[in-house]
Image (spheres, helix red, strand yellow):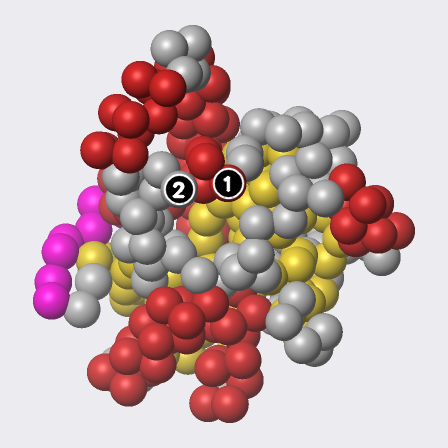
Amino acid sequence: MTAVIALLCAMPLELRPLRQRLRLRKTQLGHVGRIGERQVIATVSGVGTELARAATVRLLDAIDIDWVIVVGIAGAIGNQIPIGTLVIPDLVVDGADGSVLRPTPLRVGAARGKLWTTDELILDPGQHADLRRDGVLALDMETAAVAKVCGDRGVRWSVVRGISDRASDGTVDAEIFGLTRADGRPNVPAVGRYLVRHPGGLARLLRLGRGSRLAAERAADAAITAVSTSINS
């Protein structure tokens, strides 16, 4: 039997467009379906490197996977990158130890720049400037962890992300970040408390929501196209 392609998301909002476009069926391990003749499984890891690492281990232990594609959203480094822009990095850097990882190229778009994985919320403009000088286009919190597990197992991996916000324009701060649970779902009580403290904050949250949905949809479409193109080549 042909090995399965895994589409790994951190949050349910990133999974949603994949589930809808591919009409995936929920199972105990994840949402399953097909792209052409290839079976795929899409699943949510939760936010951060530890959860991403654990989810990747569970998936590779349970199923014969030959390709893992990380699909979802990211924060841009720099205020000039439009919301919804696809990031298909040439390199992924683990911010914890500086290790550099190279994804399997996707047959969609042109790979360029670096994606920086970190569990820290980087808000310092000086750090942003340093990252930009080093060729970093965007930040995420999972890809390097997934890549290391795949590398240890001899499984190819790729990543495609859409820009949902800009890390350097103050849109997302520690308070906003705290509105999301570790499992990637909204922390509804925390959102309520935020709106009590910031009566004008609803517009900000709605703007972030729109950006996240657009980014997730574009990343999902690119991942599906990449798999389809790979199958037909």
The three-letter amino acid code for the residue at tag 2 is Gly
Q: Is residue 21 visible?
A: no
As drawn, 228 above or below 101:
above
Badge 1 element: helix
Task: Kindly identify the residue that appears in the image at 57 percent across and 28 percent down.
Answer: 171
Q: Is residue 83 visible?
A: yes
Res 195 quadrant in image: top left
Residue for badge 1: 174
Q: Which residues are magenta?
A: 21-28
Magenta stretch: includes residue 22: yes
Q: How many marks?
A: 2
Res 209 quadrant in image: top left
Relative image position of residue 172 (x, y in whole percent): 54, 34
Residue for badge 2: 178
Which residue is farthest top? 200
Relative image position of residue 79 (x, y in whole percent): 73, 29
Instruction: State left or right for residue 153 relative to residue 74.
Output: left
Residue contact at pointers 2 and 1, CB within 8 angstroms: yes
Q: Nearer the viewer, residue 196 or 89?
A: 196
